[in-house]
Image (tube, rainbow, N blue to C red):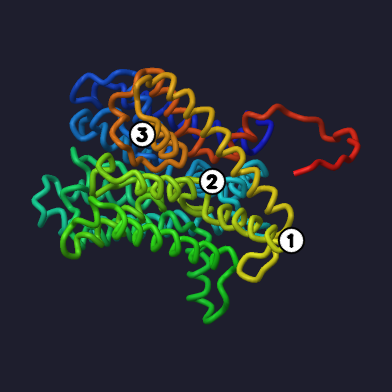
Amino acid sequence: MAFASPARFLAFGYLVYILAGWGALMLPLAQTVPVGALDALFIATSAVSTTGLVSIDPGSSFTGFGEAVILLLILAGGLGYMTVGSFAVLALRNRLSGMRNQGARLAFNLPEGTDIKEFVRAVVLFSFAVMLAGAAALWPLFRAAGLEAPVWQALFHSVSAFCTAGFSLLPTGMEPFRDNIGINLVLSLLSILGATGFLVVVDLWQRAKGGPRPLAFSSVVILRITLLLIGGGALFLAFADPPISAIEGPGRWYAAVFQAMSASTTVGFNTVPISGIDAAAVLVLALLMLVGASPAGTGGGLKTTTFAVVVAQMLSVLPRNPQTRLFGFEISPERQSLALASLGYYLALLFLFATCLLVTEAGARFDVVLFEAISAMSTVGLSMGITGSLSEPGKMIVVLLMYAGRVGILTFALAIAARRGDQDSPAPKADIVL
């Protein structure tokens, strides 16, 4: 099938995953109780987009087969359409088409010169190694906690954490394990490894093999911004949010760090009820979700590097410095334009869909609806409790938000944009007052 652009190729691929998962979840073999078509579509989209928002309880609504389908959808969505498809092609032919090369470069925001074949192989091998190690670490912890089927629970939650999906088969998610440092630590490490991005992992691995050498600039930015966001968010929650700051002992810090990590990596697990936190904490979590994870990772959001470049642009205007610098390095005008466009498209889509949600969910609080929209578009999965009560039009709006977030906001905009001619006619230049 011919596609107009790599962006449309990528968007079509995720749509195929969602439709296939939807069909599988509609099978009687997958359901323990009757599940409506819209709820099955919602769950399939949430799994492929690695969001974790659920309109029904997956653990009680689906059979073991249905849970396995959800797990495979999370895995496919977390690794990415281009990764899974390209790995299969490489296994059969050991080469990639021009469209697949362009699609992979777009999906992962890879710099020029990156060996796509080696990158895809490294991503798949690393991902499976980490997820298996995570399952092995969670198994004894879940068994000690008294969970049924601890092996399956460990595997499911390991994949869900690394792919930053936030899906859980437990009715109250991770809330029973708020004070369990072992489970908190394993899930946090898995989520951070997935959200930090495969570029950083490959960079660190090459450094380990080749001896001491500087990390790539993108890796430095990702690691610094990730640490800053998680650390700053945790400090705020621990001291400024009444429900979390009231927790006695080390549980206070477990909850604060875990929730800041969950929002920033877009994994979407919660160990405290999100509907009970303070308004200021809701705003902080919303900001962390908006920024989201890092390029070439399993998480969503605006991306840490995009956020860093936008902040650098803002700071460069204050002293009227013609150069936009980030950690001492000048950022190219092309990257600045992409960062600003990503932010613009994100805010435009957020305004559009949040407004539609406020119309369909008449009577719902503004902050609850806005939080839900940000969570869906950044593929986080945290909710203040409105997901299960959404109207049918509201569910469809959230489905579109999750789909756009998985494809990538800028990629989604490129995919739906009308085609333009190869050569634009010259336009006269004009100045404008700002």
- The vertical placement of 91 against 119, above or below, is above
Q: Which mark is residue 320?
A: 1
Which quadrant, please, contains the N terminus? top right
- The vertical placement of 321 against 36, above or below, is below
Per the model, the C-alpha gap separating discs 2 and 3 is: 39 Å
Tell whether label 1 touches label 2 (CB within 8 Å): no
**Image coordinates for residue 100, horizontal then vertical, percent:** 61, 43
**Image coordinates for residue 119, horizontal then vertical, percent:** 54, 57
53 relative to 5 in the view: left or right = left
Q: Amino acid at mark 1?
A: Arg
| Residue in the image at 48% along x and 39% along y | 406
Tell whether label 3 touches label 1 (CB within 8 Å): no
Residue 260, by quadrant, is bottom left
Residue 192, by quadrant, is bottom left
Of tags 2 and 1, the one toward the viewer is 1
Which is nearer the eye, 85 or 409? 409
| Residue beneath disc 2 | 86
Per the model, the C-alpha gap separating discs 2 and 1 is: 45 Å
| Residue in the image at 61% along x and 69% along y | 327
Q: Amino acid at mark 2?
A: Ser
- The earlier-in-sequence mark between 2 and 1 is 2
Mark 1: give few (<14), some (14-19) or many (20+) Cα within 10 Å.
few
Q: Which mark is residue 368?
A: 3
| Residue in the image at 89% along x and 33% along y | 425
- Mark 1 element type: loop
- The earlier-in-sequence mark between 1 and 3 is 1
Q: Is residue 238 visible?
A: yes
Q: Amino acid at mark 3?
A: Val
